[in-house]
Amino acid sequence: MSTRTQLKWERPPDKPEVTLPRSRKWNRAERIYHLPMRDILPKLIRANGSKGAAKVLGVSEYTIHYWCLRLNLKRITLMLGPDEEVAVRKIEDQGDKEKEEWSAVPVMPED
């Protein structure tokens, strides 16, 4: 069994923020949609799936997964019953936390 280690990119508090190099297609997508890639990718993947998002952006599916890894975006799959639904909400900034976190909260239907 192999294990994988996920790297976390954190900057020390005393050093200025450094941006990672971006490809031409990354920059082109941000120019077209007028949004940062962190907002573009989840919307495209939810609407079209990974293959569809790759086709829309003109990149490979591997590139989509790589960009998600660089942006620390996670994809999860949930199995729900016929009377269940899930709501996703953004956690607001809580002082010392610098990065955004997302959580899935199950919502039970009202009777």
Image: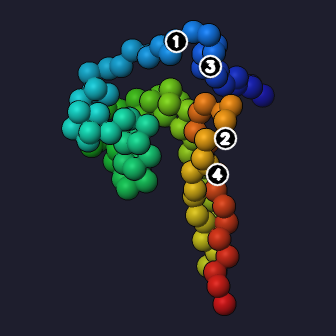
In the picture, the quarter occupied by the C terminus is: bottom right
Badge 1 amino acid: Pro
| Front of the two marks 3 and 1 | 1
Report the side of 1 relative to 76 (left or right).
right
Residue 23 is drawn in which quadrant? top left
Judging from the image, what secondary structure is the residue with disc 2 in? Answer: loop
Which circle's residue, 2 or 3, is located before the other in the chain?
3
**Mark 3 burial class by Cα count in 10 Å: few <14, some 14-19, many 20+:** few
Q: Which residue is mark 3?
A: 10
Task: Look at mark 4 in the image and give the residue it sits on.
Answer: 103
Residue at 23 percent across and 33 percent down: it is 31
Measure the alpha-carbon separation of dots 2 and 4.
Answer: 14 Å
Q: Secondary structure at mark 4?
A: strand
Q: Which of the marked residues, 3 or 1, is nearer the chain's N terminus?
A: 3
- Mark 3: which secondary structure? loop
- The three-letter code of the residue at mark 4 reads Ser
At 60% from the left and 71% from the top, the residue drawn is 85
Q: Give me the C-alpha separation between circle 3 and circle 1.
A: 11 Å
Front-most of 91 and 105?
91
Q: CA distance from mark 2 to mark 3?
A: 17 Å
Q: Could you say whether the residue bearing mark 1 is in a helix, strand or loop?
A: loop
Percent x, y of residue 64 = 41, 34
Q: Tag on residue 94? A: 2
Vertical placement of 94 versus 78: above or below?
above
- Within 10 Å of disc 1 (Cα), the crowding (few <14, some 14-19, many 20+) is few
Are discs 2 and 3 less than 8 Å apart at CB?
Answer: no
Three-letter code for the amino acid on which mark 2 is drawn: Gln
Mark 1 sits on what residue? 16
